[in-house]
């Protein structure tokens, strides 16, 4: 699943070298997909970029709209079936690869470098990954292009979970985004897992074995 893209004249052209920032949202939840965002920042870049987890919901929403309007962006989504098949680390590497591939497709050129939040990149872990990459621990707070990617990923995933909550209202996904809150765990015990729960995750796996 890939998102549409926006473009801006201020984004680097084919004659310039550009950097893609990448981050993910949704490694820890018990339910829902893992989502990666990829962003090439515009100039001047949006002000106030930071780790998406440090921003208020309103500020994240405002920044997402600005990034989508002025910068180039894409998302990569990996659903529960692939999370359970690959494990969450492998699924995260796949989501990042999909996001960067989608963004490169719309740009029509390869980046000079991909900056990835964390201590590992998909290089050598996904055969489709072909880009020069650098992992930056805490990059979502210190590298603006990664901060932008974290905002795109989190906002996209939160919307997906709100949509799923309309179909499965017992679990509070519109509030907990699939994380293992007391309400979510209590609903799991009472109602059992849905098709959107990660059966490879211990709290869900234990219930399916009862």
Image: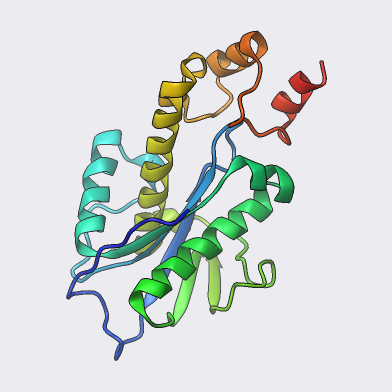
Residue 117 shows in the view = no
Residue at image x 42%, y 37%?
A: 160
Where in the figure is residue 162, as x and y percent of width and height? 40, 29
The picture places residue 95, in percent across and down from the top left corner, at 54, 56
In the rendered image, the quadrant that contains the C terminus is top right
User: Does residue 187 sit above or below 23 in this rendering?
Assistant: above
Horizontal side of residue 29 vs 22, given as left or right: right
Q: From the viewer's perspective, is 107 left or right of 36?
A: left
The residue at the far bottom in this view is 15
Image-quadrant location for residue 32: top right
Give the colour scheme shown.
rainbow
The count of marks equals 0
Is residue 28 shown to the viewer in this render?
yes
* Image vertical order of residue 95 relative to residue 161, above or below: below
Looking at the image, which residue sits at the far right? 209
At horizontal 43% and vertical 55% (from top left) the residue drawn is 140
**Front-lying residue, 126 or 145:** 126
Q: Residue at x 45, y 29 (%)?
A: 164
Identity of the residue drawn at 61% across and 29% down: 195
Front position in the image: 102 or 135: 102
Q: Position of residue 25 (x, y in %)?
A: 49, 46
Give how far across and how far down residue 15 sits, in percent.
Answer: 29, 91
Give the quarter of the image for residue 5.
bottom left
């Amino acid at each position: 699943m890939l998102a549409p893209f926006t473009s801006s004249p201020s984004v680097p052209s084919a004659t310039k070298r550009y950097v893609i920032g990448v981050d993910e949202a949704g490694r820890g939840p018990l339910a829902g997909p893992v989502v990666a965002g990829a962003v090439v920042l515009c100039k001047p870049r949006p002000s106030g970029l930071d780790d998406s987890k440090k921003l208020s919901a309103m500020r994240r929403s405002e920044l997402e709209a600005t990034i989508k309007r002025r910068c180039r962006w894409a998302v990569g989504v990996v659903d529960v079936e692939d999370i359970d098949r690959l494990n969450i680390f492998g699924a995260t590497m796949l989501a990042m690869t999909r996001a960067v591939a989608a963004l490169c497709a719309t740009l029509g050129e390869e980046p000079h470098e991909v900056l990835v939040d964390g201590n590992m990149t998909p290089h050598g872990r996904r055969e489709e990954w072909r880009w020069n990459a650098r992992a930056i621990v805490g990059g979502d707070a210190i590298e603006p292009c990664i901060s932008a990617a974290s905002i795109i990923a989190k906002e996209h995933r939160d919307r997906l979970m709100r949509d799923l909550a309309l179909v499965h209202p017992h679990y509070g996904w519109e509030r907990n985004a699939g994380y293992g809150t007391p309400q979510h765990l209590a609903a799991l015990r009472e109602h059992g897992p849905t098709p959107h729960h990660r059966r490879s995750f211990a709290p869900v796996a234990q219930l399916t074995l009862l």
